[in-house]
């Protein structure tokens, strides 16, 4: 068998996914982000501090993955589970990122819950796509992406992306996502 330089050969494998709990039970990487990890991301910073103090710094979202080599040719994949809730009236969301290798795309298949994938380019384009069970969002190369939970149950999605992609959080932290997602009197507003 001939292999290609830069893409490691590995054995095939399968993973279990618990769709209802939004978990990959035997994940090797389990990232947990709590409210305190989200400082600087919400418009109402005082509301975030109240949430941290009054609710015991609740889990915001978790990412489960069985990693593969971070190399061109491999596909990284994960289960991402974002809890419901608001900070002030802004819906719980992930930090969001560009990929470090900017020309790598990603797909998100929503398995449970409802929300939006909000996306932005470095030259100021904005896009929001609904995330709802059995619907897939395609995040093309160059778009920063953040998931937002607008519902009352966990937003669970399965994502797949080029394993060499990497995460660039710094640029979008500086730029912001242009729009925010609120739930006011039961109605979702993207403004
Ligand atoms: C990775 C992919 C997801 C996110 C996860 C958490 O490219 O987009 O696995 O990492 O949804 O979001 P974030 O912005 O905190 O990495
Ligand atoms: Zn990504």
Image (tube, helix red, strand yellow):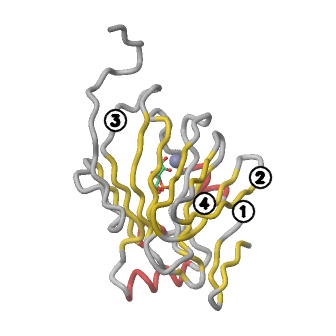
- Cα gap from disc 4 to disc 2, whole angstroms: 16 Å
Label 3: which residue? Answer: 68
What is the number of the mark on residue 147? none
> Which residue in the structure is indicated by mark 2?
124
In the displayed structure, 89 sits above or below 38; it is below
Q: Is the shortest distance between ligand 1 and the CB of mark 3 under 8 Å?
A: no
Residues at marks 3 and 1, CA–CA distance in whole angstroms: 33 Å
Mark identifier at residue 178? 1
* Tag nearer the camera, 4 or 2: 4
Q: Residue furthest left?
A: 26
Give me the residue at 40% from left, 20% from top: 7
Q: Crowding at label 2, few (<14), some or many (≥20) Cα neighbours within 10 Å?
A: few
**Badge 2 residue CB within 8 Å of ligand 2:** no
The reply to whether dot 3 and dot 1 touch (C-beta < 8 Å) is no
The Cα atoms of the two marked residues, 2 and 3, are separated by 33 Å
- C-alpha gap between disc 1 and disc 2: 8 Å
Q: Along the polypeptide, which appears first: circle 4 or circle 1? A: 4
Badge 1 vs badge 2, beta-carbon distance below 8 Å: yes
Sequence-first tag of 2 and 3: 3
Say which quarter of the image contains residue 119.
Answer: bottom right
Pointer 4: what residue? 117
Disc 3 from disc 4: Cα separation: 25 Å
Extreme right residue here?
124
Label 3 crowd (10 A; few <14 / some 14-19 / many >=20) = some
3 or 1: tag closer to the N-terminus: 3
């Amino acid at each position: 068998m001939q292999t290609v330089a830069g893409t490691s050969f590995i054995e095939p494998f399968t993973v279990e996914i618990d769709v209802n709990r939004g978990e990959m039970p035997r994940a090797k990487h389990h990232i947990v982000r709590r409210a305190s990890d989200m400082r600087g991301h919400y418009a109402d910073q005082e509301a975030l501090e109240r949430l941290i103090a009054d609710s015991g710094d609740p889990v915001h979202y978790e990412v489960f993955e069985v990693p593969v080599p971070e190399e061109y040719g491999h596909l990284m994949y994960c289960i991402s589970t974002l809890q419901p809730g608001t900070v002030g009236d802004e819906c719980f969301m992930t930090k969001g990122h560009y990929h470090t290798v900017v020309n790598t795309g990603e797909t998100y298949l929503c398995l449970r819950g409802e929300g939006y994938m909000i996306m932005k380019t470095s030259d100021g384009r904005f896009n929001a796509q609904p995330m709802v069970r059995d619907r897939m969002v395609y995040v093309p190369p160059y778009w920063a992406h953040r998931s937002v939970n607008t519902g009352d149950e966990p937003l669970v999605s399965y994502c797949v992306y080029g394993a060499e992609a990497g995460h660039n959080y710094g640029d979008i932290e500086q730029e912001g996502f242009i729009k925010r997602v609120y739930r006011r009197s039961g109605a979702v507003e993207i403004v």
